[in-house]
Amino acid sequence: MVSGMVVSIVVPVYNEQQVLAPFFARLHAVLRCLPQPYEVIFVDDGSQDATFESLLALRAKDRSVKIIRLARNFGHQVAISAGLERSRGEYVAVMDGDLQDPPEVLPAMLGQLQQGYDIAYGVRSIRKDEGWLKRSTSFLFYRLLRWVAEIPIPKDAGDFCMMRKTVVDALNRLPERNRFLRGLRSWFGFKQIGVPYQRALRTEGRTKFTLGRMFRFSLDGIISFSIAPLRLASYLGFLSALVSFFGILVMLYVRLGTTHSIPGFASITIIVLFLGGVQLMTVGLLGEYIGRVYDEVKQRPLYVASEKIGWESIESEESPALSAVHSLQSTATSKQ
């Protein structure tokens, strides 16, 4: 950690050119009330609009702004990880740049850390920005995750948080690629506390977190912290075998003990469809876990950054992910 650096703010952004100026204005007003000095690390996750140019304009006005531009869209969780790797403050906050995570909550989070907590995470008490469908699915997801996960994960708590540097260092040491940071936060343990806040309406632009992305994100969270889906597949297999066994007994009784007969076509069709559905679902669940194992064993870098602005020496502060890329490039060059 650089001597004297107190607070780091990590802000992942993706196509947020419309909201960056009002966001930074509110954030800057709050940061002036926090211990000095501070740094604001924006991670441009492969934006396709003028987000990067807007970030350059912010840095021209305030040198505390630092920018990491990823070579493509690597995803929200990876963008956060890239910012955490570069953070240097004693306290590190993570928040979105769309003003739905209010900067005015940061002093309350910092106050909890200064009282001895290691992590202060935001708990959404009111979700003004979401329709009934998204609210319902989020409500069910957090409670399902808490039920099936092998560790207690707080309900209604997103990525908005502030952590001590010791927690950030522990996160940076994790080698996994498929990241669910709010779950990893809980997995570490440490001393944690929730800070309630009202999630505000989105002022500009549209959310990038569609229902499809939310489903994939939820699946990542469940699979990363639970083997309950695999157990469910085993239970369904056992249940289908049990039902089939009793069905055979019933058909034998009807055939041998009575004068009635059971039509074969309908019963066979139902059994085949039922067993086929169970098998396909089981194979799909296995595929989800195997796919993640495959992704981990490839050992590709977590991300690749095309530009880093605001650090005196990029080489001396190279991220572990990008260092691996440069090491491979150097080896290939020497062989040539």
Image: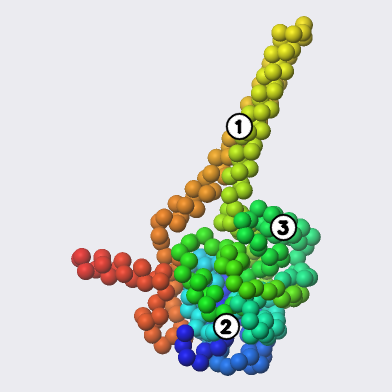
- The residue wearing badge 3 is 143
Checking the image for residue 58, the label placed there is none
- Residue 11 left/right relative to 127: left
- Dot 3: what SS? helix
* Residue drawn at point x = 61 percent, y = 56 percent: 150
Q: CA distance from mark 2 to mark 1?
A: 53 Å
- Dot 1: what SS? helix
Locate residue 125, reporting x and y percent. Answer: 77, 71
Around disc 2, counting alpha carbons within 10 Å, would you say few (fewer than 14), some (14 to 19), or many (20 or more)? many
The disc, 2 or 3, on the residue closer to the chain's N-terminal end is 2
Checking the image for residue 91, the label placed there is 2
Locate residue 172, reporting x and y percent. Answer: 48, 71
* Above or below 299: residue 313: below
* Residue drawn at point x = 62 percent, y = 48 percent: 228
The disc, 3 or 1, on the residue closer to the chain's N-terminal end is 3
Q: CA distance from mark 3 to mark 1?
A: 30 Å
**Residue 138 lies in what quarter of the image?**
bottom right
Locate residue 280, reporting x and y percent. Answer: 58, 37
Task: Mark yes or no: residue 106 visible.
Answer: no
Around disc 1, counting alpha carbons within 10 Å, would you say few (fewer than 14), some (14 to 19), or many (20 or more)? few
**Disc 2 marks which amino acid?**
Tyr
Residue 113 versus residue 27: which sits nearer the camera?
113
Residue 37 versus residue 57: which sits nearer the camera?
37
Checking the image for residue 276, the label placed there is 1
* Above or below 255: residue 271: below
